Image (cartoon, helix red, strand yellow):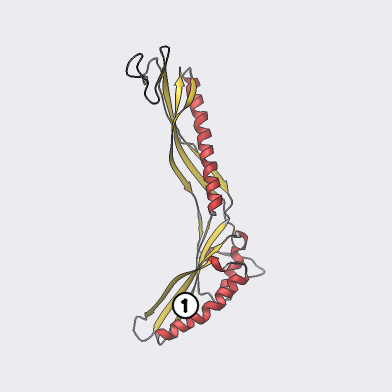
Amino acid sequence: MNRRQFIATSGIGVTAVLAGCTGSASQTGETTHSGETETEITVSTDGSVEAEPDRATVSVGLDASGSTAEDVRDELASRSEPLTDALTDVGVPSENIEEGRFRITPTRDGDAFEGSRSFQLTIDDVDRVGEVVDAAIDAGADDIGRVNFGLQDDTREALRDDALDDALANADSEAAHIAANRGGERAGTIAVTTDDVSVGGLRYEADAVAESDDEPQTEFDADPIEVDASVTVTYGFEP
């Protein structure tokens, strides 16, 4: 839905934006032509585009416990390599597997130690997110965090431009309609302000995973990502 706000001024019945006096140099956005005054129309509009997500992130973690901190450290270390190997085998590049949190603390009663280690995964083939989650679980992951669907940087920038183009096209249309309604014509652009550009995202909790009846294969059906933009444009108005 487009957010609409406009201010139209003309030389009849409303206050026009005039230069200081006849024959003086006109200020920005104010021109005089043989006694005719160009006034302004300002509109604020929105634009939006949608695209399928092309990037996902998810954290996977390991838990361990032992009588000493060294025991916990060694268990986390011994279980980390099979986990990361399984992730690379399923198609996650090693550079897309980043170290996350590493923690070892005494238990509440102080008689033992417990620890955890996590890895942050970036998955560029979103159709394989479920396969990656399953591979992590099969390799011994104890914790699967939120799965976040979003856009790669290049895609985000292109869609940002598309959303701005849509907002500006809406502004052109609004201003032309207002000018015609006031008995005049829309003139050139005087100023443009980008009010907001936002990129949506999707999150799935670990317990929101869908499984098929035949095989315990995790599947995700991510909705499109929406990119929204808002602009305020000031045009000249010729009565």
- Three-letter code for the amino acid on which mark 1 is drawn: Asp
Front-most of 206 and 9? 9
- Can you give x and y, in whole percent of width and height, for residue 234 in the image? 43, 29
Is the residue 49 above or below the residue 43 in the image?
below
Is the residue 217 above or below the residue 6 in the image?
below
Residue located 38% across and 26% down the image: 28
For the C terminus, the image quarter is top left
Front-most of 185 and 22? 22
Left or right, 232 with reference to 218: left
* Furthest-top residue in this view: 34
- Can you give x and y, in whole percent of width and height, for residue 71 in the image? 44, 86
Q: What is the total number of numbered labels drawn onto the structure image?
A: 1
SS at mark 1 in the image: strand
Residue located 42% across and 78% down the image: 115
Q: Classify mark 1: residues with Cα within 10 Å, few (<14), some (14-19) or many (20+).
A: some
- Can you give x and y, in whole percent of width and height, for residue 80 in the image? 52, 77
Left or right, 126 with reference to 62: right
* Furthest-left residue in this view: 20
- Can you give x and y, in whole percent of width and height, for residue 116 in the image? 44, 76
Residue 137, picture quadrant? bottom right
Residue located 34% across and 84% down the image: 110
Is the residue 160 above or below the residue 84 in the image?
above
Please name the residue that numbered disc 1 is placed on: 63
